[in-house]
Image (cartoon, rainbow, N blue to C red):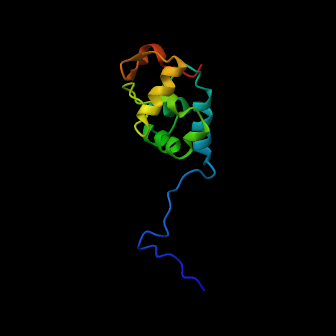
């Protein structure tokens, strides 16, 4: 009978991603999916729009389920792209025609309020 890999050696571990979204995560994903092409929201904007959670909670949802929505359209409040994949986010944002100031989104011109 084969032996199970030793967890203490790190052989039985895996990266957690995907899975079924929680109700809060589903709400975050629905909002992000509605952000129009060429516009953005900050992580805090998404939480405020939902009336709960935090920028950090929104970031956690996107780190796990972001591949399901246009994740690049959620940026830091400073206009900096998603810290996990900044180069790819910048490439996608520029391709969508998001107003930029160097390597940051021009938040005054690109921010979407959800309406």
Asked whether residue 97 is in view, the answer is yes
Q: Residue at x 51, y 37 (%)?
A: 52
Residue visible at 53% across and 34% down? 71
Residue 96 occupies quadrant: top right
Q: Is residue 52 left or right of residue 103?
A: right
113 is higher (above) or lower (below) than 56: above
State the count of labels: 0
Where residue 8 appears, x then y in whole percent? 41, 74
Residue 57, x across and y down, in percent:
47, 43
Front residue of this view, candidates 115 and 85 = 85
Against 71, is 21 above or below?
below
- Residue at the (60%, 19%) spot, across then down: 115
Q: Between residues 102 and 30, which one lies in front from this camera angle?
A: 102
Q: Residue at x 40, y 30 (%)?
A: 76
Evaluate whether residue 45 shows in this view: no
Q: Is residue 16 above or below residue 43?
A: below
Residue farthest along the top direction in this orientation: 109
* Residue 37 location (% of width, % of height): 58, 21
Residue 48 x %, y %: 49, 31
- 26 is higher (above) or lower (below) than 9: above
41 displayed left or right of 32: left
- Which quarter of the figure is the N terminus placed in? bottom right
């Amino acid at each position: 009978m084969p032996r199970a890999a030793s967890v203490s050696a790190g052989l039985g571990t895996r990266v957690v991603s995907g899975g079924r979204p929680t109700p809060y995560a589903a709400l975050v994903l629905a909002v992000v999916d509605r952000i129009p092409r060429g516009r953005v929201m900050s992580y805090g904007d998404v939480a405020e729009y939902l009336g709960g959670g935090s920028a950090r909670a929104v970031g956690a949802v996107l780190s796990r389920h972001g591949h399901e929505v246009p994740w690049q359209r959620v940026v830091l409040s400073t206009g900096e792209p998603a810290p996990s994949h900044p180069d790819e986010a910048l490439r996608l944002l520029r391709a969508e025609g998001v107003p930029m100031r160097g390597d940051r989104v021009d938040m005054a011109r690109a921010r979407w309020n959800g309406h």
